[in-house]
Amino acid sequence: MAKILVVEDDPDISALVVHKLRGAGHTVLDASDGEAALAAIRSERPDLVVLDWMLPRMSGLEVCEAVRADAALAGTRILMLTAKAQEADLERAFAAGADEYLQKPFSTRELVVRTQALLARA
């Protein structure tokens, strides 16, 4: 299927997301901070990044903006998975280049469905 990078600093949430996406047949990598995420995106070229906003060392929003600024990464899909739930946060995420936005707490079933939909659009 697809190669997906999960970027989440909470180990329990990361393990849950990784487990569900692997169960859906994907190859899943993970990172726990923004700088490691950007390095992994550049080296591994995932099809999709499931990206938390509030990360150490570099925010998910900054990672999203860096990916969108790099023409070599233009095809990378980004799903923001975050506790930030204000309408202004949603607008900022899409303005930064996110393809999809899912708020925590989230349904793992919805997460898998949204990742499948994003990958189908690629």
Image (spheres, helix red, strand yellow):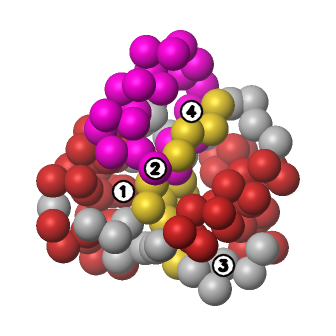
Local SS, label 4: strand
Q: In the image, which is nearer the foreground, mark 2 or mark 1?
A: 2
In this picture, which residue range is highlighted in magenta? 79-99
Residue 27 in which image quadrant: bottom right
x and y percent of residue 38 in the render?
Answer: 29, 57
At mark 3, the secondary structure is loop
Say which residue label 3 marks.
26
Q: Is residue 66 above or below residue 87?
A: below
Q: Which marked residue is nearer to the observer: mark 2 or mark 4?
A: 2
Residue denoted by label 4: 82
Residue 88 against residue 14 in the figure, above or below: above
Q: Give the Cα separation between the discs numbered 1 and 3.
A: 18 Å
Report the residue marked by disc 2. Answer: 99
Q: Residue at x 15, y 53 (%)?
A: 69
First reached walking from the N terminus: tag 2 or tag 4: 4
- Is residue 118 located in the magenta-colored stretch of the structure? no
Amino acid type shown at disc 4: Thr
Q: Residues within 10 Å of mark 1 (few under 14, many from 20)?
A: many
Q: Check contact, mark 4 vs mark 1: CB within 8 A.
A: no
Dot placed on the residue nearer the N-terminal end, 2 or 3: 3
Tell me whether the residue at label 1 lies in contact with that at label 3, contact meaning CB atoms closer than 8 angstroms.
no
Q: Relative to 122, is 17 above or below?
A: above
Q: Quadrant of residue 74?
A: bottom left
Q: CA distance from mark 2 to mark 4?
A: 14 Å
Residue at mark 1: 37
